[in-house]
Structure formats: structure tokens, C-alpha cells
Image (spheres, rainbow, N blue to C red):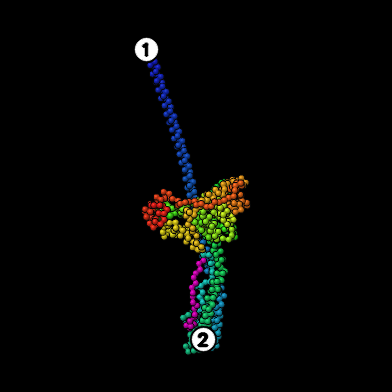
Amino acid sequence: MDSESKTVCTYEDAGDIQHRVSNRQKRRRENELHEFMDEVRTMIASFISEQNSQLSTLQQTITEIKAQNAGIQTSMEFLSAKYDNLLEELEILKNEQKMKRGRLLVNIIKERNKENPVTAKEKESATSLNIEAQEENKENSPTNNSMLSKPCHSRQIDNDLVISTSEESFIDDSDTDPSYVRQKKKNLRPKVVPESSFSSSSDSSIPHTSVSSSSSDSEIETTAITETVTQTRRQDISNEERNDQSNEEAKKGKKRLRRESEWKANKCKFLRNSEFNISFFMPKKDLCDLCEGFKNAKEEEKLKIRENYEQHLIEKKIARDHKERDKNRNDAVITAVYDLQAVMQVPKGQISLFFYKSRINCFNFTISDLKAKDVICYFWDETEGKRGAVEIGSCVLKYVDTLLEKHPDKDIDIIFYSDNCCGQQKNTFLLSVYAYVVATKRVKSITHKFLIRGHSQNEGDNVHSVIEKQIKRHIRSGPIYTPQQYCTLIRTAKKSGSPYQVEEMTFVKFYDTKILQEEWGTNFTLDEDRNQVKWHDIKILRVEKDNPGAFFYKTSFADDDYKKVSVRKRRTGQIIFTGLRQAYTQKIPLPETKIRDLTDLIRKHAIPQSYVDSYFKNVMGNI
């Protein structure tokens, strides 16, 4: 009995516990739901308040914009009215200027007519004849005064005898007004007064009385006066014609001698100060990164880099001064600048298929003598050589041999200028080439000066520009298929002076400059003061015959003394160069991708078969 009651109680307690648990869970869920609803309400309220604030801000902004628009509209109306007033004032000023100019021209013409001796002589002659005729007619026949007054009337004489010069003007406004365009002069023949004009009775403005037809004496006198005036006029015209050409030439020559340089100066000044369309040409590419960075930097950043920027500009100026001074040295010093032109490709033309295929690269290395104005171009394609220190050094060796042939009886000093490309000229391999030249040839020293980065414009750029223009002109008429066509275009690019010399380089003409560097020495990083040699900062390199085991350098054009670097230890024996060795034993094969693209061009007949047989089969092998 007790066990059954205990069991019943246990069941009842369990049910009660379960009921309490379910109620507790229910309340917890309700609480969570209420909390979630409260959070949602809070979020909605905050969102609504945020939207309201944004809406009010937008409304305020719109109101401000409307006010600004109203102000702008008012300003535009004011400016429009001001502009109209200015146009009216400008028109008034133009009219006044035209009137002043017209009055000035009239006064000048009057002054010129007063100073013209021919016109003065004509007037004096006509006036004297008029007075004599009137006095003679008064004595002989008083009734014929009207006949004499007409041909000798002052207005008639002025109109008939004075040469009309209103169409011609010797006033030259080209010096004061560069926009003035001189009108072409009209060659007007002088007018000769016909005899009939003196006896004409059509002029109603001159009063005259009737004359008897029987007055033979008066008619004879009138005819004599007319013939005298006409004869005088013809004589003056003949004298004027004799002196006309010489006077014109004298005026023309005098004007040229007096006005030519003055006109040019005034013209340039007018354009520079009024048109604002003349300025120095600024290159569109290859701009200096330091100068552009300083120009685009903020004021705080400019303060940090200003010192480097100013030093950069000083170095640029000194480098250019060095080049101008070296250009004017004596004959024993050769100053030259060299540079590698941008890559040229074959085939090259206006066929669209060419632009999507790999083609053969061609290289043009130019060396320009700044004093003699001679240019030598060393040309090769990528099957003959690359474009590194080996190729550049080999071309420099060829150029030195050419200089020694031009100066067979004396030792020379050479100064080279170039840009700062480390892979081509600012390296130990090219420096070893200079040491080899100084040690084995009639060269006392070689100095290499590197122009400042970003400001390395030189005479070689002009050579490259002339060549590129010649190539563009040729491409208009047809494509370029072989490197030999480039060589022909380079030889004919220069239209005046001595043409550019072209030497075609093959793989047998390139020498291994790396062996020269190994034979010369091993130390290229520490100078005699145990300072690290920073090749990136070097501005000048120099090797001398008197110091075969060392080279000298400067890190600034403003430095007075060179720093010395010994490439060998002092205990090492004498430097002996064993000679030059070929860098390549055969042509350099083309990459597979390039051969595939060229084969595709040949298959599509983009390259004529004649060029395929003469060139492409040799560089591509069996195709």
C-alpha cells in the first residue's frame, strides 16, 4: 500500500514539475519575443528619425541651392548687361579709331603732296601760264576772258595736272601694326590733259560769256596756251618716268634696311603680349618624374622634397653647361653623344594584321659628333645581336676606330654623353671597354658624362626624330619588310648637309665585353677612401692612360675633384688584355612564338614572296 501511494505521488510530482517547466519556457519565450519586438521598435524608430534628419538636411540643401541659383541668375543677368555695354563701347572705339586713322591718312597724303616736287612744279607752271594768259587777253581782247578762265581755272588744273595718288600709298604700317596687310599697288599711268578739255564748254559751274566766232586772235592765243601747258606736262611726265623706277627701288631698299629687324621684333612682341600663342615646346612624353612629382605635390610635401628638387635643377643646368663647353673644345678633344633608338620592327606598315603578331625587332644605335655634326648609325636586328652592354660596347669600339682613322697623326681625348640606362652604358662592362681602348689605342682618356635623369634631351633625339619622320613618310606609300629598307631610309633621312652613315652590324662584329672586365679587375664597389661606390648616383666616369688600373668618378657635376677606384690590388701584376673575342658564334634563333606568328603572316600573304625568299627564310630557317 505504501509503495503504491509513493508511486502515485511520484507521478503527480513529475507532472507538476513538467507543467512548471513548460510554463517557465513559455514565459522565457514570451520575454524573448517582447525583447525582440522592443529591439525592432527601437530600430524602426531610429531609422525613421535618421530618415527625417536626412530629409530635413536635403530640404535645407535644396533651399540653399535655390538661393544660390537665384544669385547666379542675377549675376548672369548683370554680366549679360555689362557685356552688351562693353560691346557697344568697343564698337564706338572702333569707329573712332577708324575716323582717326582716316584723318591721319588724309593729313599724311596732304603733307606728301606738298613735298612732291613734280606736283609743285606743275601747279607753279599752270599758275604762271594762267596769269600770263589773263594779262595778255586783257590787253588784246577783253571780251575773251571767259575762254581763258576756263582752261586755266585753278580747280580744273588741280584735277587734270596732279597725278592721282589716292590709290597708291607709301605709308607702311607694318611696323606699328603687325596685323596690317599691305595692299598690292596698282600701276596707274599718269593722266595727260587732252587739248579738248580746255576748249570744252560742258562745265556749267564756271561762268563765261559768249564769244564771237570771228575772234581769230583769241583762238590762236588759247591754242598756244593749251599747247604750252600740254608740252610742259609731257616733259614733266617723261622726267617722272625716268626717275620712277630708281625712286621706287631706293624707297624699297631703304625700307628693308631700316625696318626688317625692327618689324620682326615688333611682330614677336605683339604676338607674345596680345595673342599669347607663342611659348616653349613642352615634350608630351619622357617627362621628369621628380619635376612632375614636385609640381603635383601638396604644399606640405613640397617642403620635404624641395631641397632635392632644387639640387636636381642645379645638376640639370650644370650638365647642359658642361655639354656646351665640351662642344667647343679644340680638335684633339672629340665630344660625342650616343643613344639607342626605340625598337623598330619588320614587317611594319598600315596592315592591321601586323599589329597583332610578334615581329622581328631591329635596333639603331646612333653616335653624333657634336662639333663635326657627323652621325654614324650602327644597325642590326635581333638575330644578329641583343641590345645590352655587349652590343653597345662593340659599337663604341667601332666608332673609336673610325675616329682614329680621321686623326691618324695625334692622340685624342674623347668625351661621351648619354642617358642613365644602367643596362646599356652605366655599367662595369662598358667601363672595361673604355679601359681597353685607352690601354691599346691612341686615346689618352675617355670621359663619360651622364645627363640628368628626366632631362637627357640631346642631339641624338633630333637624329631619331628625323629618321622616324622619314619612316612615316615611307609607310604612307608602302610597308617595310626587311632591315635593309630601314638602312636605306636612314641614309636618305637627312635632306641637307652630310647624310647619316650606316654600318650594318652582324653577329661576327660583336665582342664579349665581359671578358674585358674580368681581365681588367674585380673591384668596382670601393674607392680609395673605402667609401661605397653607388653606381646609380654617378654623374661622370673617366679612365686615363696614365692610370691603367683605376677609374675616376663624380657623383655631382658640381664636384671639383674626382674620386679614385683601383680595380686591382697593388700587388697584382701589370694589366694585360688578351684581345677581343666574338660574343656570338652564330645567329641568334628567333623564339618559337615569333616564328609561328611570322609563318602565319606568310601563309596569309601579308608578306610578299620575294621578301620571304630573300630574308625571312634565312632568319626563320626552313618554313
Q: In which quarter of the image is residue 16?
A: top left
Is 534 placed above or below 139 here?
Answer: above
Q: Which residue is drawn at 40% across and 17% down?
A: 13
User: Over which residues does the magenta segment extend?
Assistant: 180-199
* Residue 141 visible in rendering: yes
Q: Residue at x 49, y 70 (%)?
A: 184
Q: Residue at x 54, y 57 (%)?
A: 401
* The disc label shown at residue 4, or none: 1
Percent x, y of residue 5: 38, 12
Contact check, label 2 and label 1, Cβ < 8 Å: no
The one nearer the camera, 52 or 308, is 308
* The disc label shown at residue 224, or none: 2
The one nearer the camera, 429 or 401, is 401
Q: Which amino acid does label 2 sit on?
A: Ala
Magenta stretch, main secondary structure class = loop
* The disc label shown at residue 332, or none: none
Q: Quadrant of residue 612?
A: bottom left
* Horizontal relation, residue 15 to residue 537: left or right: left
The one nearer the camera, 55 or 500, is 500
**Counting residues from the N terminus, which is met first, the one under dot 2 or under dot 1?**
1
Q: Does the magenta stretch include residue 612?
A: no
- Secondary structure under badge 1? helix
Q: Is residue 194 magenta?
A: yes
* Horizontal relation, residue 298 to residue 587: left or right: right
Percent x, y of residue 271: 53, 61
* Residue 284 visible in rendering: no
- Secondary structure under badge 2? helix
- How crowded pointer 2 is (Cα within 10 Å; few <14, some 14-19, many 20+) is rated as few
Is 4 placed above or below 336 here?
Answer: above
What is the spatial separation of the Cα atoms under label 2 and label 1, in whole angstroms?
A: 183 Å
